[in-house]
Image: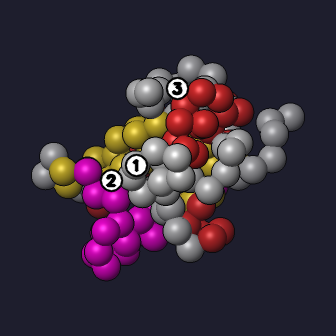
Amino acid sequence: TRPQTTLEGLDPRLVAWWKWIRPEWREASGLKLKLLETVRTEERQAWLYAQGRTRPGPIVTWRRHSNHQDGRAIDVAIVADGRVLLGANALELALYRWLAALGERDGVVSLGRRVGKDWFHFEVTDPSS
């Protein structure tokens, strides 16, 4: 299954945050941001959950239901010199921590700030009113 990367179906706060953070981050860091995944279907979540359990590969999610399915989460990559950075080393992790600190507004937080991993995952945890 392929990830969805459009803004359609996302919580309006995430859409507003994405439109704000891209130029803000570019100006602050000189680096680009890329959407890796937005809204997820139930089938895709099940497929991702099976990875590392009943199908080959590393475990990439520990939940059967994700905030992605409700349009309340997006996965964002930092891009440098055309290469997607995912926090694989100390420098990349420092960039994600900076992005998380800069981007924490309007109820949008990085999962890394909450649980210490998956710094590229940003979400709103309470439903839009």
Near-viewer residue (121 or 3): 3
Amino acid on which disc 3 is placed: Leu
Left or right? Give the position of 11 relative to 31.
Answer: right
Q: Which residue is mark 3?
A: 7
**Main SS of the magenta segment?**
helix
Residue 48 at x, y = what percent? 52, 42
Quarter holding the C terminus is top right
Question: Along the line of sight, which residue is nearer the eye, 15 or 66?
Answer: 66
Say if residue 60 shows up in the picture: no
Task: Specify whether 89 is left or right of 39.
Answer: left
Image point (59%, 61%), residue name: 111
Is label 3 in a helix, a strand or a loop?
A: loop
Q: CA distance from mark 1 to mark 3?
A: 30 Å
The residues colored magenta run 84-106
In which quarter of the view is residue 88 placed? bottom left
**Residue ranking furthest to the top:** 8
Disc 1 residue type? Pro
Per the image, the residue denoted by label 1 is 56
Q: Is residue 93 above or below residue 84?
A: below
Q: Which residue is mark 2?
A: 78
Tags 1 and 2 touching, CB below 8 Å: no
Secondary structure beneath dot 2 equals strand
Q: Of callouts 1 and 3, which one flags the residue occurring earlier in the amino acid sequence?
A: 3
Q: Quadrant of the N terminus?
A: top left
Indicate the quadrant where residue 127 lies.
top right
